[in-house]
Amino acid sequence: MERRRRTAPRRALLLACAAAVPALLLAGCSSGGSGSDSGGKGDGTAGGKDTAASGPATTTAAPAPEKFATLPNACQSVGKATVDAIVPKAKSAAGTPATSDDPKNRAGCSWTGNGKDGYQYRWLSVTFQRFGSTSAGPAEDQAKERFTDQAARLGKAPGAKVSAVTGVGDQATSVAGKATVAKVTSQNDTLLVRTGNVLVIVEYDGAGLEGKKNPSATTVNAGALRAAKEAVAAVAAANA
């Protein structure tokens, strides 16, 4: 017996791209004047020379280099041993890829199963979002801004427990809590990680069905962290 998955998974939050802001181009201006003193002809010759003042030449700084130019295959970003361990008896061990209209910059995959006894629901999702340097700013700065924004949004969920995480990526935050869907309460953990100019969001949920005991918050967090470390390593490997 399987709990039906919500129809609007949280990963949709990350699939929205920041709109690029067009740069404001500044052009130097010039002004001319014709002399009219006693010896001048007023035609730009001696005694009536036109003068032109121009501003300093403007230059556009080259965008900062992007640390990561590509994303890994999302469904291969978490190893089979990890999937088997944290999503036992997954319906599809190969994972279900998320639909993306921009696979170079956004990708995801999920796994779901009910455990070895059929009464331990587990769901794992891994989502990647890559930022490129544009007029909106350097790639890594955009990733930092999105990380901060998403962490704040996730932390507003009722009962959410937000904590910094070390040992994975350049920045990482865990948002743990519980959610009730169709009278089933699950223990959840969302691990948001920034590595360079890429965001990785790992969601891991667990629930005991038919009166079975839920996994502990510690167990769920450990599973999310294990998957996140492999996903971050997959980003580096894809760009090696």
Image (spheres, rainbow, N blue to C red):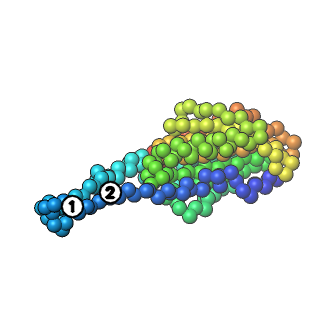
Where in the figure is residue 100, as x and y percent of width and height? Answer: 58, 61
Label disc, if present, on residue 35 of the rendered structure: 1
Q: Is residue 236 above or below residue 173?
A: below
Residue drawn at the location 26% of the way across and 55% of the way down: 53
Residue drawn at the location 70% of the way across and 38% of the way down: 176
Q: Is residue 179 above or below residue 92?
A: above
Total numbered circles: 2
Callout 2 amino acid: Gly
Q: Answer left or right for 16 relative to 123.
A: left
Give the image quarter of residue 173: top right
As rendered, which of 65 and 230 lies closer to the eye?
65
Which is more foreground, mark 1 or mark 2?
1
Q: Answer left or right for 65 relative to 147.
A: left
Is residue 64 something one can see in this rendering? Answer: yes
Crowd tier of the residue under label 1, counting other residues whose Cα lies within 10 Å: few below 14, some 14–19, many 20 or above: some
Q: Is residue 237 above or below residue 23?
A: above
As rendered, which of 85 and 15 lies closer to the eye?
15
